[in-house]
Image (cartoon, helix red, strand yellow):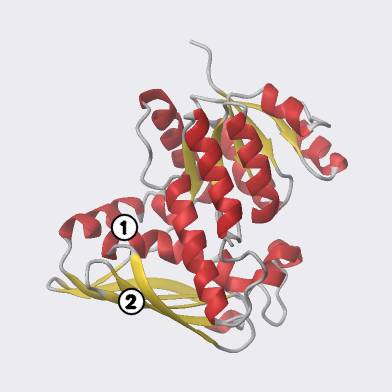
């Protein structure tokens, strides 16, 4: 049988280090080509993996059965809606968009065409954390949760390639690592029914959530911590005591698992738990938090 063709939209560090290697090495799919906003970067990435660099994004979509995205969220959303309308399955990056209206357009295109979708929230696919999340969601009985995710992307002396990302610098840790936190808290504690957001130093944001299960949780997120203070952890508290999420690694392998999930969803027609609809809900929650900080832009609430 012919393997599904997956095109890659994006040429930045995340595409170069994670998506492209995972797609090129996947045993059940074929990397069909690369398109990027910088043609020279697309040509270099395509050459590195022996595939075609496309000058026209619609040509890449046409040559693919599914499309993976590694571009800023508000570039991703309209292109994803376009690809879904053309009948292509979607492997999206987080967040789906930074406005609820943008994310809803992708959901509408997915539901209108019946294609499969997966949002690559790393913790939902990493070998060490994915089964842990499923176990805690099944166990239930949680009273509260605590998430702490401070990166040093914009900290003093940072040499990270991701520090050059304009959208991360503009939107900060709330939008970059906030989706990771919510991708764990929502399936375990339930939907967010109430939230409070408080600004901390630099781009640090403190969040307090009430969940549909009756549990509460808190989260601190940011990208500007000193390297010595950087780290990420999620802990749950309940009848089973305190349970900490295990450490994780292997972004390439995790992305490969997300490809598996997309292919399975496309084959069976069963929606994945971490699909564009969860991506929309995460965007809605983060937009509400941003509005609470007094930093919402026109249309951030979808109006």
Q: Is residue 82 visible?
A: yes
Q: Is residue 37 left or right of residue 167?
A: right
Residue marked by disc 1: 187
Quarter of the rendering occupied by the C terminus: bottom right
Q: Residue at x 42, y 58 (%)?
A: 248
Q: Is residue 128 left or right of residue 281?
A: left
Q: Quadrant of residue 32?
A: top right
In this view of the protein, which residue sits in the foreground, 73 or 5? Answer: 73
The disc, 2 or 1, on the residue closer to the chain's N-terminal end is: 1
Circle 1: element type? helix
Circle 2: element type? strand
The outermost residue toward the front is: 303
In this view of the protein, which residue sits in the foreground, 232 or 236? Answer: 236
Q: Residue at x 36, y 45 (%)?
A: 273
Identify whether 84 is placed above or below 141: above
**Residue density around tag 1, few if under 14, some if 14–19, many if 20 or more, within 10 Å:** some
Q: Give coordinates of residue 95: x percent, y percent.
A: 56, 57
Q: Give coordinates of residue 24: x percent, y percent.
A: 61, 31
Q: Residue at x 65, y 51 (%)?
A: 14
The outermost residue toward the top is: 1
In this view of the protein, which residue sits in the foreground, 195 or 70? Answer: 195
The outermost residue toward the left is: 239
In this view of the protein, which residue sits in the foreground, 111 or 1? Answer: 111
Identify whether 179 is placed above or below 6: below
Distance from Cα at disc 2 to Cα at disc 1: 13 Å
Q: Quadrant of residue 210?
A: bottom left
Q: Quadrant of residue 84?
A: top right
Numbered marks: total: 2
Identify whether 107 is placed above or below 121: above
**Residue density around tag 2, few if under 14, some if 14–19, many if 20 or more, within 10 Å:** many
Q: Residue at x 63, y 48 (%)?
A: 77
Residue marked by disc 2: 217
């Amino acid at each position: 049988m012919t393997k599904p063709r997956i095109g890659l939209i994006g040429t930045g560090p995340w595409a170069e280090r994670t998506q492209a290697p995972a797609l090129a090495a996947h045993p059940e799919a074929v990397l069909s080509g690369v398109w990027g906003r910088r043609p020279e970067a697309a040509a270099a990435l395509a050459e590195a993996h022996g595939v075609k660099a496309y000058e026209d994004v619609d040509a890449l979509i046409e040559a693919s059965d599914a499309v993976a995205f590694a571009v800023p969220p508000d570039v991703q959303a309209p292109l994803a809606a376009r690809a879904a309308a053309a009948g292509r399955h979607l492997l999206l990056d987080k967040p789906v968009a930074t406005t609820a209206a943008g994310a809803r357009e992708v959901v509408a295109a997915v539901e209108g065409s019946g294609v499969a979708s997966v949002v690559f929230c790393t913790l939902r696919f990493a070998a060490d954390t994915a089964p842990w999340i499923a176990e805690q969601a099944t166990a239930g009985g949680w009273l509260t949760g605590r998430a702490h995710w401070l990166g040093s992307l914009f900290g003093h002396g940072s040499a990270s390639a991701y520090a050059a990302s304009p959208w991360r610098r503009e939107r900060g840790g709330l939008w970059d690592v906030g989706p990771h936190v919510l991708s764990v808290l929502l399936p375990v504690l339930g939907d967010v029914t109430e939230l409070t957001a408080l600004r901390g130093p630099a781009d640090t944001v403190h969040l307090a959530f009430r969940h549909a299960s009756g549990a509460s949780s808190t989260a601190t997120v940011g990208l500007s911590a000193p390297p010595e203070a950087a780290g990420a952890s999620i802990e749950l508290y309940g009848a089973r005591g305190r349970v900490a999420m295990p450490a994780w690694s292997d972004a390439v392998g995790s992305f490969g698992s997300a490809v598996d999930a997309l292919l399975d969803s496309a084959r069976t027609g069963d929606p994945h738990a971490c699909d564009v609809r969860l991506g929309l809900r995460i965007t809605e929650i983060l937009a509400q938090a941003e509005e609470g900080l007094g930093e919402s832009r026109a249309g951030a609430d979808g109006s």
